Image (cartoon, rainbow, N blue to C red):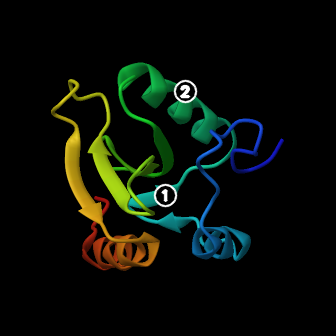
Amino acid sequence: MNRLLDKDELPQWFSYPVEFKRIVEQGLLDFDPWIILENDRLRTRYEGVKQRYPKRELIPFARREDNDDIACWESNKGGRVIIIHDFAGEGYENVQEFDNFWNWLRSALEATIEYDGE
């Protein structure tokens, strides 16, 4: 099984950005509190998001350990990274948006620097 969703699991409109695949291939998966989703955890979250937010087309790729925020790509958003508070009621889930994956990663690294997991 692939670590990430494969083309048979993904909608036609989506393919993983090159910069994201580069980070995954380098094994940079844990930016505590952000963690890149992979394998069963990714698939479970992907299916859950489809059920919880049926009006949206979201591809989750990371989760925050200290709350229910997840980072996603969304159809018709042109590569923007959308942060949603998963399990929130429909219409109340939006938290933040980043112009692209690199901007999200910079923010995730800042959170790592500031994070005290205790």
Q: The C terminus is located in which quarter?
A: bottom left
- Residue 5 occupies quadrant: top right
- Residue 79 occupies quadrant: bottom left
Q: Residue at horizontal 33%, vertical 54%?
A: 82
- In this view, the residue farthest toward the left is 92
- The vertical placement of 6 against 96, above or below, is above
Secondary structure of the residue carrying tag 2 is helix
Three-letter residue code for mark 2: Glu
Three-letter residue code for mark 1: Ile
Q: In the rendered image, which residue does mark 1 sit on?
A: 35
Q: Position of residue 45 (x, y in %)?
A: 51, 34
Q: Is 51 positioned to the left or the right of 111 in the image?
A: right
- The vertical placement of 17 against 73, above or below, is below
Q: Position of residue 22 (x, y in %)?
A: 67, 76
The residue nearer to you, when weighing 109 against 118, is: 109
Q: In the rendered image, which residue does mark 2 sit on?
A: 47
The residue nearer to you, when weighing 93 against 28, is: 93
Q: Position of residue 16 (x, y in %)?
A: 63, 60
Q: Residues within 10 Å of mark 2 (few under 14, many from 20)?
A: few
Q: Position of residue 110 (x, y in %)?
A: 30, 78
- The vertical placement of 35 against 104, above or below, is above
Q: Is 13 positioned to the left or the right of 58 in the image?
A: right
Q: Residue at horizontal 47%, vertical 26%?
A: 50
Q: Residue at horizontal 37%, vertical 70%?
A: 104
- In this view, the residue farthest toward the right is 1
The residue nearer to you, when weighing 86 against 110, is: 86
Q: The N terminus is located in which quarter?
A: top right
Q: Nearer the viewer, mark 2 or mark 1?
A: 2
CA separation in Å, label 2 and label 1: 18 Å
Q: Residue at horizontal 38%, vertical 62%?
A: 80
Query: Disc number at residue 74?
Result: none
